Image (cartoon, rainbow, N blue to C red):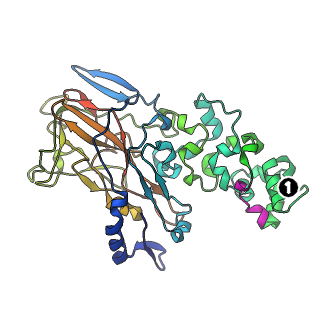
Amino acid sequence: MQFIWKISKPSNVFIPNQMKFKKYLLATTALISVALQPQPSLAQPPTITYSVGKYQVQAPDWAKITWGTLPPVPESGYLSIPKNLIPQFGYDPSRSWSAGQQVDSIVMLGDVEDAFRLDSFTLNQISAITPANSAKLTLKDFGLMEWQTPKSLVKAIPSLGNLNVNQVQPIRDLFIKAGVSGGGKIGQIINYNPKAANLTLGNLDLSKYSLNSIPRLNITQINKFSGWQRSFINQVPNLDQVPFDKMPLPIQSGTGVVGVASVVLGKAERGDAKVGANYFVSGSVNSRSATIPVACEAGKECAYMELGDLVGQGGSLYGKRWASGLSQQVKGGFGFLSVVNGGKEPTGRLVYGPGFKVALTGVNESKGTADFGLFFRICVRPPLGPRTCTPYFIGPIPWIPVSENNLVILGAGG
């Protein structure tokens, strides 16, 4: 989706051009709208079964779940940012994806910066966690090398500046392309030759150079490299094989708060003006990564799962409702990216933290089952502004179903 902005001087804050924006939004919202459908039966992620009295819960086994093992997205979509805005973002967060595409090729590191701190990893730390063999990896396998320059590499790895150019083959070959031959320290050359300093490594065949061809590359944090935020997860060697419980900021288990899935009710249900937000555990997500309960609109379709509490009628969850994202769309996102998808996301909860939102994606009254899905968002932290995120609209990734009279994981909600 494209946006039209104007700069409000002298504050240098971006504000939508309201008339043009609203007109354009009405014309293009359908292009990236959430298309929730009942999910096909897919192999569910690895789980651990917990028993609490007569109840059971299927909890995700985060030690066996990685970005690479998440089910593919069932719907296509895209986000397009105007070229004149890209310098203000610091990189281009635009992207498109197709139905059936893996999540690790859609989510950029900048999207989940606050959720998992993937950018604080080094390649050596990733290799120590994963079973993959890194010996034959090349610079081409480390996708963000494509847009690095000698200048940005020296900024990320200061010791490179003191090395002779002949000690670092990729930089030597790049300097030759820039018309610089002979020896000399890398730092000195980039100081007097701007052309050589700013030529990107993408001008080389990076498959010819091992990761070890750049000294200390393997022990440098990802966030030291220029434009690390725009790297997709699958562009970092073996990162898609790191279990979620081994992230620099490990995922929240969510099992601290569980309720009983008492009954699921389908599309015939309607919102009731007497049933306010305090009756719901599902809703929208604010900028502080907290779930804000939202009631179904009176008279509108409102399929939901009604909860019980382990301590009985006196429990805080007794009688609460988790509304279906098929029935209810709520306000989502914050900052100027909040207008994506019409500013809406499926109602749900941050069960496992802010990395993704869990939504109820379908109920089957006859079988007494409820299906769930994960939704992702796009986030950017502009150099001169606060972090901004779209609503959670990428998905749904089929997740663990729940049956009546079993437990459902609620998490803390944020």
Residue 240, x across and y down, in percent: 53, 38
Q: Which residue is mark 1?
A: 185
Q: Quadrant of the N terminus?
A: bottom left
Image position, residue 305 (x, y; %): 19, 38
Indicate yes or no whether the magenta region holds residue 198: yes
Dot 1, how many residues are within 10 Å of its Cα: few (below 14), some (14-19), or many (20+)?
some
Q: State the residue in front, 223 or 135.
A: 135
As for residue 251 lying within the magenta part, the answer is no
Q: In the image, is 361 to the left or to the right of 79? A: left
Q: Quadrant of residue 297?
A: bottom left
Looking at numbered disc 1 in the image, what kind of residue is underneath it? Lys
Above or below: residue 49 compared with residue 78: above
Magenta segment, which residues?
195-203
Query: What residue is drawn where x is 43% and y is 40%?
Result: 72
In the structure shown, which secondary structural element does the residue marked by tag 1 occupy?
A: loop
Describe residue 343's horizontal placement relative to residue 209 as left or right: left
Residue 95 visible to an observer of this rendering = yes
Report whether 198 appears left or right of 61.
right
Q: Position of residue 191 (x, y in %)?
A: 80, 64
Quarter-wise, where is residue 181 in the image? bottom right
Residue depicted at 33% across the width and 22% down the height? 49
Outermost residue toward the right?
Answer: 182
Quadrant of the image containing the C terminus: top left
Location of residue 15 with respect to 207 vertically, above or below: below
Between 216 and 142, the one lying in front of the other is: 142
Residue located at (53% from left, 39% from top): 248
